[in-house]
Image (spheres, rainbow, N blue to C red):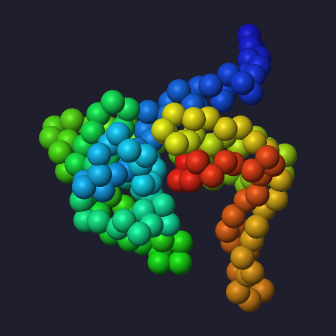
Amino acid sequence: KEVTVFAKEDDLLVSAVEKNQPRIAQIYPQVMATGTPPVARGFVVSRDGLIVTTMSDLGDVLAKKYSIKIGDRVHSAELVEVKNVARAIAFLRITDLGNTSLDAVAFGGKVDPKIGQTVVALGGEDGSGIFKTILSRLVYEEAVGTTTPRLLSGIEVTPKIPEGYNGAL
């Protein structure tokens, strides 16, 4: 017997938000109190406490040690390395997990984005915001030669994601 199941877009979005929102990290230099706005947001990418963010979010306050707030817990972290200077991706490692582990963000498989698809940004000023928008333009870097495929380097959405969502997932 064959059974057909219809999934509503809202149900899929709610499920994705519930699964990934607790993995958003608010990042503070250790000299700042966690009650102030975070200098950056990132997300947990491995169970052993690796956090990824962008250098542009860390801005002028680049430090060696950080406080990472995930949900109600605050952890200590160190800047591990910076990759891809052009895109400036920074990795921080939580140093006080002990024998515990974190849930890492769930990445989907490779998808070719299409104009008109729904985009959901998790983040916002306090890390708990949700913003839903529509993919309106794909931005590609020029290919090198005739056999190299173009590289998707950015997206544009309508309406635009608010500024407070920098570093959002």
Q: Residue 137 is drawn in which quadrant?
A: bottom right
Question: Which residue is situated farthest in the bottom direction here?
Answer: 145
Instruction: Decide if residue 47 is in sight here.
Output: no
Q: Residue 105 versus residue 110: which sits nearer the camera?
A: 105
- Look at 74% across and 27% down and name the residue there: 9
Where does the image place residue 32, in percent across and percent down from the top left?
A: 29, 52
Where does the image place residue 22, in percent across and percent down from the top left?
A: 44, 33
Image quarter in which the N terminus is found: top right
With 71 as the anchor, is 157 left or right in this view? right
- Look at 36% across and 61% down and name the residue there: 91
Q: How many marks?
A: 0
Question: Which residue is situated farthest in the left direction here?
Answer: 98
Where does the image place residue 168, in percent across and percent down from the top left?
A: 55, 48
With 57 as the anchor, is 47 left or right in this view? left
In this rendering, the answer to whether 15 lies above or below 87 is above
Instruction: Decide if residue 13 is in sight here.
Output: yes
- Look at 78% across and 62% down and name the residue there: 138
Q: Residue 108 is drawn in which quadrant?
A: top right
Question: Which residue is situated farthest in the top direction here?
Answer: 1
Where does the image place residue 155, in percent across and percent down from the top left?
A: 73, 59
Q: Residue 144 is drawn in which quadrant?
A: bottom right
With 71 as the anchor, is 94 left or right in this view? left
- Look at 27% across and 39% down and name the residue there: 74
